[in-house]
Image: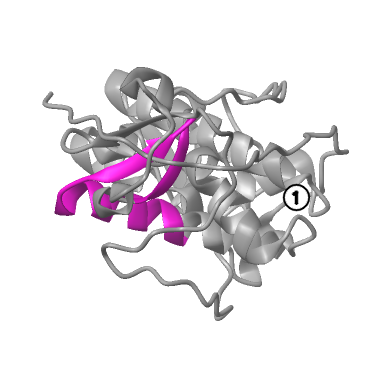
Protein backbone atom coordinates (compact mmCIF):
# COMPACT_ATOMS: atom_id res chain seq x y z
CA UNK A 1 0.00 0.00 0.00
CA UNK A 2 1.33 3.37 -1.00
CA UNK A 3 1.02 6.04 1.66
CA UNK A 4 1.72 9.77 1.55
CA UNK A 5 2.20 11.84 4.68
CA UNK A 6 1.75 15.61 4.62
CA UNK A 7 1.90 18.53 7.05
CA UNK A 8 -1.16 19.90 8.81
CA UNK A 9 -2.14 22.36 11.54
CA UNK A 10 -4.86 21.46 13.99
CA UNK A 11 -5.72 23.48 17.05
CA UNK A 12 -8.12 22.31 19.71
CA UNK A 13 -9.08 19.18 21.52
CA UNK A 14 -11.99 16.90 20.81
CA UNK A 15 -13.19 14.49 23.42
CA UNK A 16 -16.40 12.67 24.23
CA UNK A 17 -17.19 10.79 27.40
CA UNK A 18 -18.99 7.48 27.15
CA UNK A 19 -21.54 6.40 29.69
CA UNK A 20 -23.28 3.15 30.44
CA UNK A 21 -26.88 3.06 29.26
CA UNK A 22 -29.63 0.56 29.98
CA UNK A 23 -30.33 -1.59 26.88
CA UNK A 24 -33.47 -0.68 24.94
CA UNK A 25 -36.39 -2.91 24.05
CA UNK A 26 -36.68 -4.80 20.77
CA UNK A 27 -35.64 -2.74 17.76
CA UNK A 28 -37.99 -4.02 15.10
CA UNK A 29 -40.61 -1.33 15.94
CA UNK A 30 -37.96 1.40 15.73
CA UNK A 31 -36.85 0.21 12.31
CA UNK A 32 -40.41 0.40 11.07
CA UNK A 33 -40.08 4.13 11.75
CA UNK A 34 -37.04 4.19 9.49
CA UNK A 35 -33.60 3.14 10.63
CA UNK A 36 -31.03 5.50 9.17
CA UNK A 37 -33.04 8.65 9.68
CA UNK A 38 -35.58 8.20 6.91
CA UNK A 39 -36.35 11.61 5.46
CA UNK A 40 -34.25 13.54 7.96
CA UNK A 41 -32.25 16.25 6.19
CA UNK A 42 -28.72 16.96 7.41
CA UNK A 43 -27.15 20.10 5.97
CA UNK A 44 -23.55 18.99 5.38
CA UNK A 45 -21.11 19.90 2.63
CA UNK A 46 -20.30 16.43 1.34
CA UNK A 47 -18.83 17.47 -1.99
CA UNK A 48 -15.48 15.89 -2.79
CA UNK A 49 -12.68 18.14 -1.57
CA UNK A 50 -14.55 19.36 1.51
CA UNK A 51 -12.63 20.26 4.68
CA UNK A 52 -14.40 19.85 8.02
CA UNK A 53 -14.00 22.17 10.99
CA UNK A 54 -13.31 19.80 13.86
CA UNK A 55 -11.28 20.25 17.01
CA UNK A 56 -7.94 18.48 17.49
CA UNK A 57 -4.90 18.88 19.70
CA UNK A 58 -1.98 21.02 18.60
CA UNK A 59 0.72 18.51 17.75
CA UNK A 60 -1.76 15.90 16.60
CA UNK A 61 -0.55 12.95 14.54
CA UNK A 62 -1.76 13.46 10.96
CA UNK A 63 -1.39 11.84 7.57
CA UNK A 64 -3.11 11.24 4.26
CA UNK A 65 -4.45 7.88 3.13
CA UNK A 66 -4.12 7.80 -0.64
CA UNK A 67 -5.10 4.26 -1.53
CA UNK A 68 -6.12 0.93 -0.05
CA UNK A 69 -9.40 -0.34 1.38
CA UNK A 70 -11.26 2.80 2.45
CA UNK A 71 -13.45 0.75 4.79
CA UNK A 72 -10.40 0.05 6.95
CA UNK A 73 -10.10 3.74 7.80
CA UNK A 74 -13.59 5.21 7.45
CA UNK A 75 -16.02 4.19 10.16
CA UNK A 76 -18.46 5.84 12.59
CA UNK A 77 -15.74 6.34 15.20
CA UNK A 78 -13.39 8.12 12.79
CA UNK A 79 -16.12 10.50 11.55
CA UNK A 80 -17.98 11.16 14.81
CA UNK A 81 -16.13 14.44 15.49
CA UNK A 82 -17.60 15.89 12.29
CA UNK A 83 -21.11 14.93 13.32
CA UNK A 84 -20.62 16.28 16.85
CA UNK A 85 -19.27 19.56 15.42
CA UNK A 86 -22.27 19.85 13.09
CA UNK A 87 -25.04 18.62 15.39
CA UNK A 88 -23.77 19.16 18.94
CA UNK A 89 -23.43 16.72 21.83
CA UNK A 90 -27.18 16.86 22.48
CA UNK A 91 -28.13 15.73 18.98
CA UNK A 92 -31.06 13.37 18.47
CA UNK A 93 -29.65 9.85 18.15
CA UNK A 94 -31.50 9.11 14.92
CA UNK A 95 -30.12 12.28 13.31
CA UNK A 96 -26.64 11.50 14.63
CA UNK A 97 -26.83 7.96 13.22
CA UNK A 98 -27.75 9.28 9.78
CA UNK A 99 -24.86 11.74 9.94
CA UNK A 100 -22.43 8.93 10.81
CA UNK A 101 -23.63 6.91 7.83
CA UNK A 102 -23.38 9.80 5.38
CA UNK A 103 -19.96 11.04 6.49
CA UNK A 104 -18.53 7.49 6.58
CA UNK A 105 -19.59 7.05 2.96
CA UNK A 106 -18.09 10.46 2.11
CA UNK A 107 -14.80 9.52 3.79
CA UNK A 108 -14.60 6.39 1.63
CA UNK A 109 -15.34 8.48 -1.47
CA UNK A 110 -12.49 10.89 -0.64
CA UNK A 111 -9.97 8.04 -0.40
CA UNK A 112 -11.20 6.55 -3.65
CA UNK A 113 -11.03 9.99 -5.31
CA UNK A 114 -7.39 10.54 -4.40
CA UNK A 115 -6.81 10.89 -0.66
CA UNK A 116 -8.29 11.66 2.76
CA UNK A 117 -6.73 13.41 5.74
CA UNK A 118 -6.79 11.79 9.19
CA UNK A 119 -5.54 13.24 12.48
CA UNK A 120 -5.48 11.36 15.78
CA UNK A 121 -7.80 8.72 14.37
CA UNK A 122 -10.32 11.24 13.04
CA UNK A 123 -11.30 11.91 9.43
CA UNK A 124 -10.68 15.61 8.72
CA UNK A 125 -11.44 15.94 5.00
CA UNK A 126 -9.83 15.66 1.58
CA UNK A 127 -6.06 15.59 1.10
CA UNK A 128 -6.20 19.21 -0.17
CA UNK A 129 -7.14 20.32 3.36
CA UNK A 130 -3.42 20.19 4.15
CA UNK A 131 -2.42 23.32 2.25
CA UNK A 132 -0.35 25.83 4.24
CA UNK A 133 -0.83 24.19 7.62
CA UNK A 134 1.99 23.39 10.07
CA UNK A 135 2.70 22.11 13.56
CA UNK A 136 1.82 18.43 13.77
CA UNK A 137 3.62 15.11 14.07
CA UNK A 138 3.86 13.15 10.83
CA UNK A 139 2.95 9.59 11.72
CA UNK A 140 0.32 7.93 9.56
CA UNK A 141 -0.01 4.86 11.78
CA UNK A 142 -0.68 7.07 14.80
CA UNK A 143 -2.95 9.30 12.72
CA UNK A 144 -5.19 6.29 12.05
CA UNK A 145 -5.12 4.95 15.60
CA UNK A 146 -8.30 5.71 17.55
CA UNK A 147 -9.08 4.59 21.08
CA UNK A 148 -12.65 3.44 21.65
CA UNK A 149 -12.57 4.98 25.12
CA UNK A 150 -15.57 2.86 26.08
CA UNK A 151 -15.94 -0.72 27.28
CA UNK A 152 -18.52 -2.54 25.18
CA UNK A 153 -19.55 -6.15 25.59
CA UNK A 154 -21.44 -7.04 22.42
CA UNK A 155 -22.85 -10.50 21.82
CA UNK A 156 -21.68 -12.48 18.81
CA UNK A 157 -25.33 -12.97 17.84
CA UNK A 158 -27.47 -9.84 18.09
CA UNK A 159 -31.01 -10.16 19.43
CA UNK A 160 -33.25 -7.72 17.57
CA UNK A 161 -36.44 -9.68 18.30
CA UNK A 162 -37.61 -9.86 14.69
CA UNK A 163 -41.01 -11.17 13.68
CA UNK A 164 -41.22 -14.89 12.98
CA UNK A 165 -41.65 -14.34 9.24
CA UNK A 166 -38.59 -12.09 8.88
CA UNK A 167 -36.36 -12.88 5.89
CA UNK A 168 -32.71 -13.63 6.68
CA UNK A 169 -29.76 -14.72 4.56
CA UNK A 170 -26.05 -15.32 4.89
CA UNK A 171 -23.91 -13.05 2.72
CA UNK A 172 -20.45 -14.09 1.55
CA UNK A 173 -17.35 -12.51 0.03
CA UNK A 174 -17.38 -9.01 -1.40
CA UNK A 175 -21.16 -8.85 -1.28
CA UNK A 176 -20.96 -9.50 2.45
CA UNK A 177 -18.29 -6.85 3.07
CA UNK A 178 -20.28 -4.29 1.08
CA UNK A 179 -23.21 -4.78 3.45
CA UNK A 180 -21.17 -4.04 6.61
CA UNK A 181 -22.13 -0.37 6.81
CA UNK A 182 -23.35 1.94 9.61
CA UNK A 183 -27.00 1.49 8.63
CA UNK A 184 -26.59 -2.29 8.97
CA UNK A 185 -25.57 -2.05 12.63
CA UNK A 186 -27.56 1.00 13.74
CA UNK A 187 -30.50 -1.03 15.07
CA UNK A 188 -28.21 -3.33 17.05
CA UNK A 189 -26.47 -0.42 18.78
CA UNK A 190 -29.75 1.28 19.66
CA UNK A 191 -30.98 -2.03 21.07
CA UNK A 192 -27.75 -2.40 23.05
CA UNK A 193 -27.41 1.18 24.33
CA UNK A 194 -30.88 2.70 24.18
CA UNK A 195 -32.23 5.79 22.44
CA UNK A 196 -30.64 8.04 25.07
CA UNK A 197 -27.18 6.60 24.43
CA UNK A 198 -24.04 8.69 24.76
CA UNK A 199 -23.08 9.68 21.20
CA UNK A 200 -19.47 8.54 21.53
CA UNK A 201 -20.55 5.18 22.92
CA UNK A 202 -22.97 4.82 20.00
CA UNK A 203 -20.27 5.60 17.41
CA UNK A 204 -17.90 3.15 19.13
CA UNK A 205 -20.61 0.47 19.13
CA UNK A 206 -21.20 0.91 15.40
CA UNK A 207 -17.48 0.82 14.64
CA UNK A 208 -17.01 -2.35 16.71
CA UNK A 209 -19.96 -4.14 15.12
CA UNK A 210 -18.80 -3.17 11.62
CA UNK A 211 -15.39 -4.69 12.40
CA UNK A 212 -17.18 -7.78 13.75
CA UNK A 213 -19.20 -7.91 10.53
CA UNK A 214 -16.05 -7.78 8.38
CA UNK A 215 -14.52 -10.60 10.43
CA UNK A 216 -17.64 -12.73 9.95
CA UNK A 217 -17.52 -12.10 6.19
CA UNK A 218 -13.93 -13.32 6.03
CA UNK A 219 -14.75 -16.44 8.05
CA UNK A 220 -18.00 -18.20 7.04
CA UNK A 221 -20.21 -15.27 6.11
CA UNK A 222 -22.43 -12.83 7.98
CA UNK A 223 -26.16 -13.07 8.64
CA UNK A 224 -28.42 -10.18 7.60
CA UNK A 225 -32.17 -9.89 8.21
CA UNK A 226 -35.02 -7.66 7.11
CA UNK A 227 -33.05 -7.57 4.71
CA UNK A 228 -29.88 -5.57 5.47
CA UNK A 229 -29.57 -5.50 9.26
CA UNK A 230 -26.47 -7.27 10.57
CA UNK A 231 -27.31 -10.01 13.08
CA UNK A 232 -24.03 -11.88 13.47
CA UNK A 233 -21.97 -14.63 11.89
CA UNK A 234 -23.45 -17.41 9.80
CA UNK A 235 -23.73 -19.57 12.94
CA UNK A 236 -26.45 -17.22 14.25
CA UNK A 237 -28.90 -18.56 11.67
Quarter of the image with the N terminus is: top left
- Left or right for 122, reference 206: left
Query: Closer to the camera, 9 or 146?
Result: 9
Question: Can you identify the residue that label 1 sits on?
Answer: 26
Is residue 114 depicted above or below 236 in this figure? Answer: below
Q: Residue furthest left?
A: 2
What segment is highlighted magenta in the picture?
Answer: 102-125
Query: Closer to the camera, 33 or 63?
Result: 63
Is residue 85 depicted above or below 151 in this figure? Answer: below
- Where residue 129 appears, x then y in whole percent? 32, 53
In magenta stretch: residue 105: yes
Is residue 163 depicted above or below 86 in this figure? Answer: above
- Where residue 130 appears, x then y in whole percent? 31, 47
**Residue depicted at x 48% and y 72%:** 44
As helix, strand or loop, the secondary structure at mark 1 comes to loop
Residue 28 seen anywhere in this rendered image of the structure: yes
| Residue 37, image quadrant | bottom right
In magenta stretch: residue 28: no
- Left or right for 129, reference 23: left
Residue 233 seen anywhere in this rendered image of the structure: no
Q: Residue furthest right?
A: 22
Colour basis: one colour
Would you call the spot at circle 1 few (<14 residues within 10 Å), some (14-19), or many (20 or more)? some
- Where residue 53 appears, x then y in whole percent? 52, 57
Callout count: 1
**Residue depicted at x 78% and y 35%:** 17
**Residue depicted at x 61% and y 26%:** 148
Query: Closer to the camera, 237 or 191?
Result: 191
Amino acid sequence: MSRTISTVLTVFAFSATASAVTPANALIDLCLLGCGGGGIDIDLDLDLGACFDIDLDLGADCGVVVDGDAALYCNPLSVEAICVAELGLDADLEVFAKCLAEVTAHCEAEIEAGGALFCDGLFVGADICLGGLLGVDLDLDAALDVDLGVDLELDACIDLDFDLDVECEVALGLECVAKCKPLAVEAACIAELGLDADLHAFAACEAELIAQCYAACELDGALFCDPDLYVGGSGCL
